[in-house]
Amino acid sequence: MTYEEAKMQIQAIPGKIWDQLSEPDREAMEMAFSTLEKQIPKKPKSVFCPQCGEEFTDDDCWSADYCRNCGQAIDWRK
């Protein structure tokens, strides 16, 4: 299963089932979803992280696979 497929599976959980989960279970699912989203590479906005806005330094550009600030996977391909 790809990260994108897993994200779609979580999003497909009907509200009826979601409402039956305990608060700790909902919180855990939300944390898992957030973490999963960061594994899907996103294109940077110029030299900034698309997730948190952190600026990439010259050392990072074209070599960092993840944002050092928030952990977002980065896709540097043009």
Image (spheres, rainbow, N blue to C red):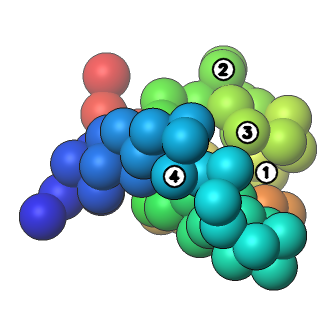
Mark 1, residues whose alpha carbon is within 10 Å: few (<14), some, or many (≥20)? few
Nearer-N-terminus badge (4/1): 4
Circles 3, 4 touching at the beta carbon (< 8 Å)? no
Nearer-N-terminus badge (3/2): 2
Compared to residue 43, the image places residue 28 above or below, namely: below
Helix, strand, or loop for circle 4?
A: helix
Which corner quadrant of the image does residue 12 belong to?
top left
Disc 3 versus disc 2: distance between alpha carbons?
13 Å
Give the residue displayed 45% in from the left and 39% down from the top: 14
- For residue 17, the mark is 4
Residue that label 3 marks: 51
Image quadrant occupied by the N terminus: bottom left
Q: Is residue 5 left or right of residue 16?
A: left
Q: What's the residue type where badge 3 is placed?
A: Gln
Counting from the top left corner in percent of width and height, residue 32 is at 59, 69
Give the residue displayed 48% in from the left and 30% down from the top: 43
Residue 63 in view in this figure: no
Residue mark closest to the camera, 3 vs 1? 3
Disc 2 versus disc 4: distance between alpha carbons?
40 Å
Nearest the camera: 23 or 62?
23
Q: Is residue 16 left or right of residue 19?
A: left
Q: What's the residue type where badge 2 is placed?
A: Ser
Nearer-N-terminus badge (3/1): 3
Disc 3 versus disc 1: distance between alpha carbons?
16 Å
Counting from the top left corner in percent of width and height, residue 68 is at 75, 68
Circles 2, 1 touching at the beta carbon (< 8 Å)? no
